[in-house]
Amino acid sequence: MGFLQEGPQLAHPWRSDRLLHGLLDRVLPAERRAALDADLAALGDYAQMAWQRASESTRPNPVLTQWDAWGHRVDRIELTTAWLEGPQLTTRHAVLAAGHAPGEYARLEEFARVYLYHVASEFYTCPLAMTDGAATAIKASGNAALIERALPHFLSRDPARFWLSGQWMTENIGGSDVSHSETVARRDGDGQWRLHGRKWFSSAVVGEAALALARPEGAGEGNAALALFYVETMDGQRRKPELIIDRLKDKLGTQELPTAEIHLDGLPAWPVGELAHGVRQVAPMLNVTRTWNAVCAVASMARAISLTRDYATRRQAFGRPLIEQPLHAQTLADMQAEFEGAFALAFEVAHLLGRVESGAATAHEAALLRLLTPLAKLWTGKLAVKICSEALEGFGGAGYIEDTGLPQLLRDAQVYPIWEGTTNVLSLDSLRALAGEGLAALRLAVDDWLAGSDDAAAAAVITGALDAATAHLDRHGADRASLEAGARGLAFTLAR
Ligand code: MFK
Ligand code: FAD
């Protein structure tokens, strides 16, 4: 047998992560920082084990069985091993509970866990994100009955009590634009609301609950007439018969995540708030899941870079390891620099979210959070695709071969810019935020940073970007079409 190339080894995602250590050491009080260590080490161990396990086996995708042998409708979904491990692992390490603990660091402590767990989770983080979002939206609604009913399940540390929640917004007619949604809410004689319609993408269909947009019968047209409803999907161990799973989607990536097309045939539902303005009511959920998206996109970049860097020490070309080839080393350094910027942005949003929710933030920080959330989601989503593509190239031909486990990184990354608001939709959302206090808040934050920095080159770039953004808004403010046409460029400039 001739030469055989060694594959990449995954460094311990927590112990080897200089950036995450640096951030947590800098920001957290010593006691909280120390208390976090055991959970982060365990999630890092799990990630390393899962990478090893995946390289030793072929992974089955989820399978939907709609009918049993006797003709009963069962809509049973068999899940992958990582998904079956998800409830136990995430409740033991308080992934969601941490984010809803008191204090300004809660979200930072939650997202440190998410960052280490995400890739190994096989996108179990997707329904976790939606569950976190549902908990946040229900809290924001002030609906005491729902808070009492759902939150003890969503935030439980006991896997037997834990419930996942979905987010049922997208319909065949629109996902970015939900204003023509066709799902109707009808009230029974006994006063119970029931949902009738079709939801076109449901990524938490194995969950026990969901927040769904629907139009109360007789309400007008448009998105202001949509209401937000809470539903439960299970009747004991059985899925409720009014929830029908039509099909699992055949997707480019995120294949372990069972994303379904569903029908609602009178599923019982409870209004979250007033029977209108459902989009406004679901917005806290969107902003939380967009933060998850940013942190998970950064986690995918971290994984891709870690593997490519390791491989560069093992692979020789032209007489030395790749890492000693100046151009390859520069390529890796450029990836690392872009990744570190994205990491800083995503975790800034996580920290700000905790400050705002705990009441520790100023009004400017709240406005900054409103602006940075869509910017972080759209920027990290695009960058994850670019970095994962570059990482595959760093393996040469091996990066294109399925059973190395590497192509999956790129296929999975392509989802980040699409779901939870596409790049364009979030660029337009950042215009919404800029129309409020967003730009002034960003200027203040930048002024603060400049006052404490002696990096003149960075200061010139940042000030230049803010000036360009202000000029763009001034020039096109009155002309909506030009403002929108330039919104993506503006968002990229501000995010960078
Ligand atoms: C592993 C990674 C984890 C991530 C998990 C991901 C799971 C993915 C599953 C999904 O994809 S779930 C579906 C996600 N769907 C979207 O994200 C929808 C994309 N479309 C938008 O975001 C639109 O901007 C939106 C539907 C929200 C609104 O469009 P419109 O029709 O132009 O709404 P309009 O009238 O401007 O806004 C209605 C209200 O909501 C306004 O408030 P008021 O009623 O008080 O005037 C807006 O200010 C408010 N609003 C909209 N977006 C907001 C917001 N408020 C706060 N934050 C926001 N982001
Ligand atoms: P469209 O809105 O038709 O977008 C098509 C293109 O038009 C995009 O490039 C978009 O940027 C652009 N565009 C749209 N409007 C504008 C505008 N005003 N200006 C400029 N450009 C515009 N949804 C759920 O509700 N729940 C789920 O659990 C869920 N899970 C998903 C899982 C996966 C794997 C995927 C891929 C999607 C999932 N979705 C889910 C749906 C997802 O949120 C939508 O697909 C997404 O929001 C885009 O909506 P759309 O598909 O209707 O695209």
Image: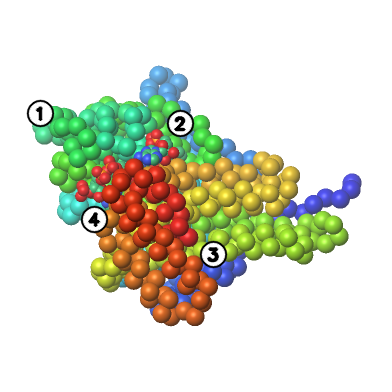
Mark in front: 3 vs 1: 3
Amino acid under disc 4 = Lys
Q: Disc 4 to disc 2, how far (Cα)?
A: 31 Å
Q: Is residue 64 visible?
A: yes
Can you tell me whether the CB of the residue at mark 4 lies under 8 Å from the nearest atom of ligand 1? no
Density class for disc 4 (Cα within 10 Å; few <14, some 14-19, many ≥20) is some
Q: Quadrant of residue 222?
A: top left
Residue 62 is situated, as x and y percent measured from the top left of the image, at 50, 36
Q: Which residue is mark 1?
A: 189
Q: Disc 4 to disc 3, how far (Cα)?
A: 33 Å
Mark in front: 1 vs 2: 2
Amino acid under disc 2 = Leu
Model colouring: rainbow
Residue 273 is situated, as x and y percent measured from the top left of the image, at 17, 46
Q: Which residue is mark 2?
A: 248
Amino acid under disc 1 = Gly
Residue pushed farthest front?
475
| Residue 139 numbered tag | 4
